[in-house]
Amino acid sequence: MAEISKPIKSLRHYQVLYGVSRFLLYGILTLGAIIAIIPFIWMTQTAFKTYGEHSARKFWPAALTAAPYAERPASREVVVDMQPADDWRNVPRSYSQALGGSITVDAVSRHVASELERKNFSIPFEVNILAVDLTDDDTANYDSFRLTVGTKVVGQFITRIDGRQIGGPNYEGADRGRWGPHYQVIDPNPNHFVVRESWDVGHILFNNFIYAWKDANFARYMSNSTIITIITIIGVVVTSTLAAYAFARMKFPGRNLVFTIYLATYMIPGAVTLIPNYLIIVGLEEFFQTTFGIKNAWYDSWTAQTIPFMINAFSVFLLRQFFAQIPDDLFDAALIDGAGHLRFLTQVVVPLSKAPIMTVIIFNGIWAWNQLQWPLIVTSSEKWRPVTVGLISFISDAAAETHLIMAGSVITMIPILVLYFFTQKTFTEGIATTGLKG
């Protein structure tokens, strides 16, 4: 009996140790996941805050509470009596006589009311509107409007809306009229100037995102980033697939030595190659200008941001390891059917390698999308600068508008998150099935 009890005790001891180790392992993984998600939560929260809330280090943004949306008065349309804006100061250039008017505000949202109360600001009050014609023609086209409270000075705290945009003035510190009421010019006719007063929920909630998109010209930057990323991915997939197949399936003298030297280039820091790459771009730009008369063939163009990065050592290594696992019998069968290397690659190897190719697409797509330093070096205008450069526009000598930077960062993350959401299964499969067979 004593001999039987010893294995039982050892088994129980092993089970206890196994349970404790599993508990510690899952605890460490859970703690790591929580730590990893904290920056994302902070970024998202900050993206909904006002500048004042972030400066005061308030934990929860008011935009994610019920206060700005509760008991909102009904919308209304107001006909404003517009007169020559002779008593306004710092009026911008207008091709027609600038006009000014005012709307009496007798109801505000709850959040604005609390802000005004702290400033000893009584209701009702006047919202002043300045209409300016920025169109250089013979017609009085009023297409730009400035909103302000308590002053008729076009200055730092003026809110500008154009066309059918929605916006509001700075209600004594209520952050650029975010909380309402908001105004939209329905009819800019000087003889029948109509303004709609409302409390726009989308403007209140997504104000930072709307402002970041418009102020940083994110539409152009997003388009540039999309084009640059797609071109880079196509180039990397083509060159990496061909190079990986050559290293994995084709036999030639010094193959392993060449592959080893090629992998060694992956160990070189990017900062070391920064200046040589820039000098190459400058030389190519001069060559194309003097030889073909083409300006900006490389500098300040998509070519400098894509072509130098269409060769990637890690991508070649990843695909080469996967291609090396494909049985030789498949290639022998393809040879019997009269197929060569190119046909075998396109009709057999590539279809079997969807997972690692998708991994290459995701890695290089994220890298190309997040590029910042190199685009700043090889571009001098907004024409081909990517979305990451747009975030810099919120950093000035005075201060960094962190809430807008975080809103812009969330916008830049959306395409990557969508890409990963739809490809995560193939991506994880590619990582799991790509071995180290050499």
Image (cartoon, helix red, strand yellow):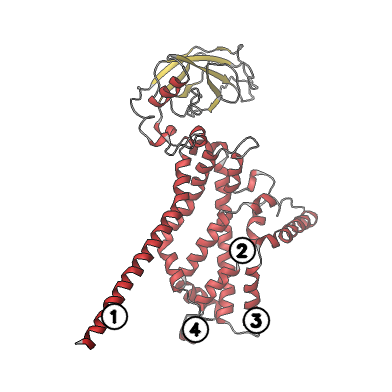
Answer with mark 1 or mark 2, whichever residue precedes in sequence. Answer: 1
Q: Secondary structure at mark 2?
A: loop
Disc 3: CA contacts within 10 A as few (<14), some (14-19) or many (>=20): few
**Residue 255: percent from the left, percent from the top?**
63, 82
The residue at which mark 3 appears reads as: 257
Of all residues shown, which one is farthest toward the right? 290
Type of amino acid under label 4: Phe
The residue at which mark 4 appears reads as: 331
Q: Quadrant of residue 8?
A: bottom left
Image quadrant occupied by the C terminus: bottom right
Tell me if residue 57 can be seen: yes
Type of amino acid under label 3: Leu
Disc number at residue 310?
2
Q: How far apart in space, not on screen, are marks 2 and 4 (Cα)?
A: 28 Å
Q: How far apart in space, not on screen, are marks 4 and 1 (Cα)?
A: 52 Å
Image quadrant occupied by the N terminus: bottom left
Left or right: where 123 falls relative to 1:
right
Q: Are marks 3 and 4 in contact (CB under 8 Å)?
A: no
Tell me if residue 192 can be seen: no
